[in-house]
Image (spheres, rainbow, N blue to C red):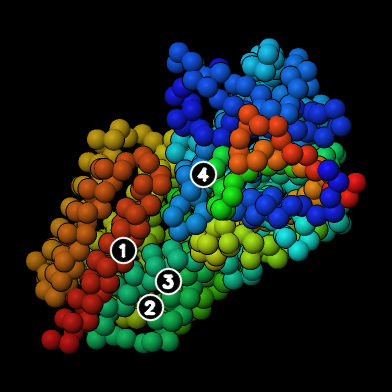
Amino acid sequence: MNISKLPQEVEAVLEGALVAILTVVNERNEPVSHPMLPLYDREKGVLYFTSSILFSKKLEHIKKNPRVSVLISHREYVNCEKYHAVEIKGDARVLDQDLSSEWQRLLPLWRRKEPYIDTYLKQRFALPLFWERAIIEVQPRKVRVWRDGNLEREPEHYVLGG
Amino acid sequence: MVGESDLRKFEQVAMAFIDEDGYPATIPLITAKSNGDVKLRLPRGVEGSKLDDKKVNLILNHITPLAIGGYTDRRYIVFRGLARVRDGDVSMEVEKTYTWDERVTPFPEYVEVSTSRARRYLEGIGKRLGDTFKPSIGVFWSFFRTVRLPFLIATAVPVAIGTGAAFYRGFFDPTLLLLTLLGLSCIHLALNVANDYFDTLFGADTVNRRPTPFSGGSRAIIYGIVNMQEARLIYTSLFIGGTAIGAYLAVTRGLIEIAVLTALGLFLSYFYTAPPLKLAYRGFGELAVFLGFGPVIVLGTYFVQTQSIGLDAVAASIPIGLLIMLILYVNEIPDAPYDKEAGKMTLLTRFTKTQALGFLAGSLAATYLSILLIPLLNLGPASVLIALAGIPLAYRVYRGVEQNFGDPYRMIGVMSLNVKNAAITGSLVAAGYIIGAAL
């Protein structure tokens, strides 16, 4: 089904997810997966991740091949009323011109998922390289939804902007 | 490949592959227990032919969500290799596996082993944008970390004792006290930066994967907060500043005595890690710290005030020299395996645990015995005995070291307690002299 915006139920899952599996493509065209904290901006319909430069291999991979996919699954890892398993394929870009502060615009979204984050941020001097962070911005293109997380049921497919 | 016990450790099971549209796909897998093993099955809507005989990665992931929001207890394991799919059942020819479990590799250690990647990324950005990038923590925190500012307590307390001992004899000039404190602080901070510079140069800090706020150096050079040239400039400037103040005090208060003590302080500070002597690398670090932070600082401070040196000042310098030496000693415990790897043969690298604890107990006992001897030998007032109130704290330090020996993160509390013990016991000695003068 072609849609212009992610279905609201999917948006609720993205907003409630504590962890997502982000898969990028390496130089040998193989998938490489990373558990990451997803941050969803409902207004823009864009999914964000922030990555410390300590763990920057994925950033290099995305710069060479922007195609990524994101999976949100397992009921207990998603704080929302109606859980669905969601896979999103999308195009990513890395924002790393200002590693020190640009990612901080995502702090309101981050704070909602990890309320204690400011306590760590106040001690930035303790782990300075951890707080040098790039933004990974994912524009969703295709969505696959296993309703109620039921993997035995045929998933629903959506294509964005198609 | 995946056993039932894995399913208890990892709830989220997913497989990724390159889909026909060129995008990677990441799909949840159905798991079913079967005779101790786990069968992995594709979910509906994913054709087996898309994965069969293709490079995939299987990821097993776990977090423990917290009631307050957020999560903890992160771990994952990734299997990479070729997928085999038969009637929707998935198996793999595993080529590579990697894992992270924060209970096994605590996050600070994970960060530490990834530092060089971060530095390379910053360098890459710098080349791309034509600039130099450093971790952004502000000028104050950069200075704070680079010079290890909180450790100035190790200078302030012996200066207080030297001043207290002089005050007991009726001498006190606040301007001279401030000058002494400033000069000695410069030399101490220079020592800290020079220590980092040479420990980085010789690899002792670089190999340390489990630094703490008390051990493993400041990390300022390793994290790129300052580069080697800047570190050299900082310690050279601080040494020059300290020497200049020492020279002024020598000219105004006593040329030979102050010049000798300043030169000795500079010598011990620089050659603590600098070649050719590299005192700390040869097992003389503790002795150097005892001399530098005990007799050199206390006698220097005392002389600046009184223009004389007596046995009373020497006696006053012993306990604090031992206590500051013990700050270094206890902080070196978590560093010992890495110091050994880098050839920095501190006392701890040569001791067994029993010997290390014996040295600690002996030094603590010597500290309080030396306090007891001050009035007994008529070298100071009986009121310095109030410093014996530090004994329970010293005992807690010993017990803490004994219980947490070698575990860097569990030792953080003990290392902090040990610094407090030095500060409190040392301050009580200084207070004892002032009380003695007032009585």
- Spatial CA distance of label 4 from label 1 is 44 Å
* Residue type beneath disc 3: Ile
Q: Is residue B325 above or below residue B254?
A: above
* Residue type beneath disc 4: Glu
**Nearer-the-camera pick, A115 or A94:** A115
Disc 1: host chain? B
Q: Which residue is mark 2?
A: B304
Q: Which residue is mark 1?
A: B420
| Helix, strand or loop for disc 2 | helix
Q: Position of residue B212 (x, y in %)?
A: 46, 51
Q: Residues within 10 Å of mark 4 (few under 14, many from 20)?
A: some
Q: Are marks 3 and 4 in contact (CB under 8 Å)?
A: no
Q: Which residue is mark 4?
A: A76
For the N terminus of chain A, the image quarter is top right
Q: Is residue B56 above or below residue B101?
A: above
Disc 3: host chain? B
Q: Which residue is mark 3?
A: B258
Looking at the image, the residue that sits furthest to the left is B376
Q: Residues within 10 Å of mark 3 (few under 14, many from 20)?
A: many
